[in-house]
Image (spheres, grey):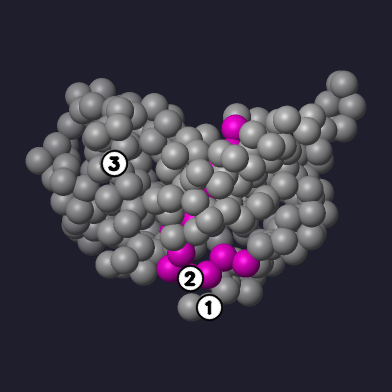
Amino acid sequence: MTNLIKIKNLNKTYSTAAGDFVALKDINLHIQAGEFLGVVGKSGAGKSTFLNMINGVDQLTSGEVTVNDVSIHSLSEDARALWRSKNMGVVYQSFQLLPMLTLVENITLPMDLSDNFHPRKSRDRALELLKLMELDEHAHKLPSFISGGQQQRVAIARALANDPPILVADEPTGSLDSITADHIFDVFEHLVTQQGKTIIMVTHDMALAEKFSRSLNIVDGQLVEIANASESIAMDHTIRMRK
């Protein structure tokens, strides 16, 4: 495997009315192509900020993030948005599907925004992705006519619209029941093992740590590699006892 993402001396500090808040501290990490990387931690630990540093949605304070040898934070905001649309899919916990568009139209939208839209080809691609998610029979429905778990699968399909090599997912199973969450995991594992995607997923659920090919625990803005979920829970308990 090759190092697809390299994070060097990453720091992120937010200025607030109460003073500076350090969200991430001295993060150094290599993520290999084809990994299913899990980042687990409590709410407010810095998980979403970490993802936003990788996808370039938010600017870092210091350090560098390179993805396939592109230093993404050295790009202009417009260039970074275009790069992201072609190289990285983003899956949100809240789905963020447009309610007035059908499932097919929601999936073809990223193709249009990245100047990659071709009427017949894009529609076929959307239908292919819906079939992968076992939702092709709902293709022409509006999001409000399908369940939450189905909407999340559509959100994954939309993130794959431009066939990006990388998928980042922010608590994608947080609001789902356990059966639906397991199905989402199955979809992700298929994307990694059968399509060679690299997936980075953050979650607050420590019990999920053992399901990833590699797991990291984020505590107070710092990352620590863990071997399994039980070690993660024990380490987190030790940290809290020391405070």
Of pointers 3 and 1, the one earlier in the residue sequence: 1
Amino acid residing under circle 2: Ala
Amino acid residing under circle 1: Thr
The segment highlighted magenta reads 30-42
Looking at the rendered image, the disc whose residue lies closer to the viewer, 2 or 3, is 3
Amino acid residing under circle 3: Asp
| Labelled disc at residue 2 | 1
Q: Residue at x 42, y 31 (%)?
A: 174
Q: Give the Cα distance between marks 2 and 1.
A: 6 Å
Of pointers 2 and 3, the one earlier in the residue sequence: 2
User: Dot 3, how many residues are within 10 Å of its Cα: few (below 14), some (14-19), or many (20+)?
Assistant: few
Residue 120 is situated, as x and y percent measured from the top left of the image, at 20, 58
Viewer-proximal residue, 190 or 226? 226
Task: Please identify the dominant SS of the magenta region.
Answer: strand
The image shows residue 160, relative to residue 6, as above or below, that is above
Quarter where residue 97 is shown: top left
Q: Residue at x 67, y 50 (%)?
A: 223
Q: Residue at x 64, y 34 (%)?
A: 237
CB under 8 Å between discs 2 and 1: yes
| Labelled disc at residue 182 | 3
Residue 83 is situated, as x and y percent measured from the top left of the image, at 55, 61
Residue 69 is situated, as x and y percent measured from the top left of the image, at 63, 74
User: Dot 2, how many residues are within 10 Å of its Cα: few (below 14), some (14-19), or many (20+)?
Assistant: some
In the figure, is residue 60 to the left or right of 167? right
From this viewpoint, is residue 239 visible?
A: yes
| Pointer 2 residue | 33
